[in-house]
Image (cartoon, rainbow, N blue to C red):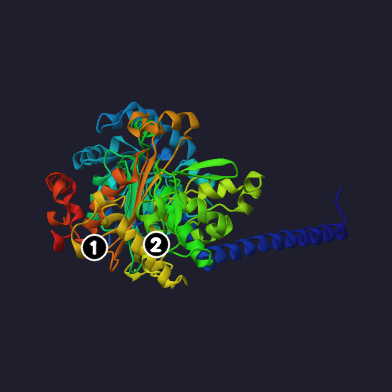
């Protein structure tokens, strides 16, 4: 049956409306797509081009050249040498074991090296290059480069690695670098991305550690194009990093090498300080160690050899070690009493070999006693009883105050690892730390540098420099950074009475230059180079009444670790001081026999800026000194002598 005309027209109108709606929707979608395509292709073209490039372009960090370290004359102490190495990127390598096995056939690679590299690659992000082998020869690198198609993910590189030309002579001052470890990352708050580079070298001890940020510099970058397999096709761009700053120390490399050689065979520390500006000319600790062993990670065998040595070569005795100062502390006690107006330098005290205090007998080193002694004689002959008497007048608080004024019991601000503060004890310290009251016997012990008093060779050198100059000299180790000189340590006046200081210096002069002085055997004969000083011997064991009754056991008859420490402090020339020195020989016995001869030899080397004439020595030791000079001069590496002094 045929539909009415009206129904047909209505149906056509509905179809037309639907067609228009669908067409409009389609047109809207196409328009939106067109607008979006226009935005992406024109307005956001740079952004999407960058995203596309990042799929084929890698950006890698370039470690900067580490700053160099020199001595005061320009002798290199820490240098950088070219280092050929192989790195591997895990995500590009595929089968790590297979690639390492192939690589092992081309370059020296031990099973331990392979295992270490695998462990490090698994700890790091897959795109981070991991060092597999370093310090390779050019021939090794060439073989790897030729076989590159068969070694995906393996990249030969050339970089810089730290080297210490003078080895053990500066091991405790310059310190050393080593690969950054997980422990390093856990204990330092440093967001520098360089630290994420496996086996990146950072300072571990000494100057290298304390001035790490100065020496490290800033990273550079390079943009490289890689193919679908991750292989590097070409370098697109390179921006070099900012090298670390160079550091010049106040140390004299020639003198430092001499000091280390002169201390050889001992467990000892020695410090030489310039009185003009506080410059540390030598900071020696013996025995030392080769810091180059630590640069790539020290072996277990080498570590055990250092760690098990009873002379403790890893300890920087010159500024970390603390020792009872013994009789070298007597100048502190004397100055404290004089400054308080409680002692007349001409006043005498009778020494009968001991002094009784609160029912306890305190002995002088000379069993028969020294008789009547004044300040001058007490220092010259190192009488203990004189100080047992005067310390009771002044008290421990004033003695401790004078000690700190002279540089003891404080941590000197130096860029070195674990600089010791020592201890200048007083009543408050004992109550706070020990929970006990201070006793008069504690004061008596402290008056001669025993008991709780502890000092380092560095502090003793500063004390001596301040006595010799009358100024608050501070030790300076860094002379310049990138050619900019650092503040001097010359210091201002101590505010001590110059007449009293002169009396102390004259007595110290007599210690080394009067026939009855305790250091007369180690004197400097040249009158214009005369050395003033003070010997010291500090006990490390208690001598019982029974032992005194039968005779005190000689040091040489005791085991090494139970012998007394030997100390000496001095300055020269006595009439116009230029340098101050301190020497501590662990378990060396007597200061006059063990420490004073070393101090004299070092002082002469400093005064003459090289080997002194034999005429500066007493005639009875010149033959031995000649042989010693030849031996020590042959020991000084050529690099320790700058061209203008060779």
Residues at discs 2 and 1 in contact (Cβ within 8 Å)? no
Q: Mark 2 sits on what residue?
A: 475
Query: Is 388 in front, or is 216?
Result: 388
Instruction: Find disc 1 in the rendering and name its residue.
Output: 73
Identify the image quadrant of residue 141.
top left
**Residue in view at x 26 percent, y 48 percent:** 597
How far apart in space, not on screen, are marks 2 and 1 (Cα)?
Answer: 18 Å
Q: Position of residue 276 (x, y in %)?
A: 33, 69
**Residue 344 placed where, x, y %?**
47, 65
Q: Secondary structure at mark 1?
A: loop
Q: Nearer the viewer, residue 141 or 273?
A: 273
Task: Tell me: residue 502, above or below residue 151.
Answer: below
Q: Earlier in the sequence, mark 2 or mark 1?
A: 1
- Residue 289 circle label: none
Q: Quadrant of the C terminus?
A: bottom left
The picture places residue 356, in percent across and down from the top left corner, at 54, 44
Q: Is residue 165 visible?
A: no
In screen coordinates, is 394 left or right of 371? right
Q: Is residue 493 above or below residue 95?
A: below
């Amino acid at each position: 049956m045929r539909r009415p005309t009206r129904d047909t027209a209505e149906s056509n109108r509905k179809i037309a409306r639907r067609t228009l709606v669908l067409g409009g929707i389609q047109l809207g979608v196409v328009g939106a797509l067109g607008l979006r395509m226009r935005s992406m292709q024109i307005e956001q073209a740079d952004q999407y081009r960058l995203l596309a490039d990042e799929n084929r372009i890698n950006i890698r960090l370039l470690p900067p050249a580490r700053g160099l370290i020199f001595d005061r004359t320009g002798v290199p102490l820490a240098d950088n040498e070219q280092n050929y190495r192989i790195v591997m990127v895990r995500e590009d390598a595929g089968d790590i074991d297979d690639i390492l096995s192939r690589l092992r056939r081309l370059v020296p690679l031990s099973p331990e090296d392979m295992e270490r590299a695998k462990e490090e690659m698994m700890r790091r992000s897959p795109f981070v290059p991991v060092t597999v082998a370093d310090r390779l020869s050019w021939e090794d690198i060439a073989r790897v480069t030729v076989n590159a198609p068969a070694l995906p993910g393996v990249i030969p590189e050339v970089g810089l690695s730290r080297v210490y030309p003078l080895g053990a002579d500066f091991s405790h001052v310059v310190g050393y670098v080593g690969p950054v470890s997980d422990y390093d990352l856990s204990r330092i708050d440093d967001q520098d991305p360089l630290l994420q580079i496996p086996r990146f070298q950072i300072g571990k001890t000494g100057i290298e550690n304390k001035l790490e940020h100065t020496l490290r510099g800033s990273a550079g970058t390079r943009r490289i194009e890689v193919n679908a397999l991750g292989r590097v096709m070409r370098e697109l761009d390179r921006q070099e990093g900012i090298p670390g700053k160079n550091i010049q120390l106040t140390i004299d490399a020639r003198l430092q090498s001499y000091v280390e050689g002169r201390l050889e065979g001992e467990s000892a520390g020695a410090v030489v300080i310039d009185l003009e500006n506080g410059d540390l000319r030598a900071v020696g600790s013996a025995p030392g160690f080769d810091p180059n062993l630590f640069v790539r990670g020290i072996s277990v065998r080498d570590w055990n050899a250092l760690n098990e040595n009873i002379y403790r070569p890893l300890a920087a005795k010159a500024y970390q070690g603390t020792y009872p100062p013994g009789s070298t502390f007597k100048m502190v006690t004397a100055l404290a009493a004089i400054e308080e107006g409680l002692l007349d330098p001409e006043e005498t005290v009778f020494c009968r070999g001991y002094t009784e205090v609160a029912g306890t007998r305190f002995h002088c080193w000379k069993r028969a006693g020294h008789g009547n002694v004044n300040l001058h004689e007490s220092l010259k002959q190192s009488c203990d009883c004189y100080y047992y008497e005067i310390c009771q007048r002044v008290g421990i608080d004033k003695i401790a105050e004078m000690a700190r004024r002279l540089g003891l019991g404080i941590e000197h601000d130096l860029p070195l690892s674990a600089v010791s503060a020592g201890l200048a004890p007083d009543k408050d310290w004992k109550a706070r730390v020990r929970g006990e009251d201070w006793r008069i016997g504690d004061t008596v012990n402290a008056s001669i540098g025993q008991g709780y008093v502890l000092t380092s060779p560095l502090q003793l050198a500063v004390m001596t420099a301040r006595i010799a100059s009358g100024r608050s000299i501070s030790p300076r180790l860094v002379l310049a950074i990138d050619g900019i000189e650092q503040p001097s340590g010359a210091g201002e006046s101590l505010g001590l009475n110059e007449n009293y200081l002169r009396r102390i210096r004259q007595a110290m002069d007599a210690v080394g230059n009067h026939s009855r002085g305790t250091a007369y055997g180690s004197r400097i004969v040249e009158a214009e180079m005369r050395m003033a000083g003070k010997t010291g011997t500090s006990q490390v064991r208690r001598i019982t009444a029974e032992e005194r009754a039968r005779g005190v056991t000689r040091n040489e008859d005791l085991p090494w670790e139970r012998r007394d420490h030997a100390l000496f402090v001095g300055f020269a020339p006595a009439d116009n001081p230029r340098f101050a020195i301190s020497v501590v020989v662990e378990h060396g016995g007597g200061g006059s026999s063990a420490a004073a001869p070393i101090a004299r030899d070092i002082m002469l080397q400093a005064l003459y800026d090289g080997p002194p004439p034999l005429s500066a020595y007493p005639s009875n030791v010149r033959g031995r000194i000649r042989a010693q000079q030849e031996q020590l001069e042959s020991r000084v590496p050529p690099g320790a002598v700058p061209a203008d002094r060779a």
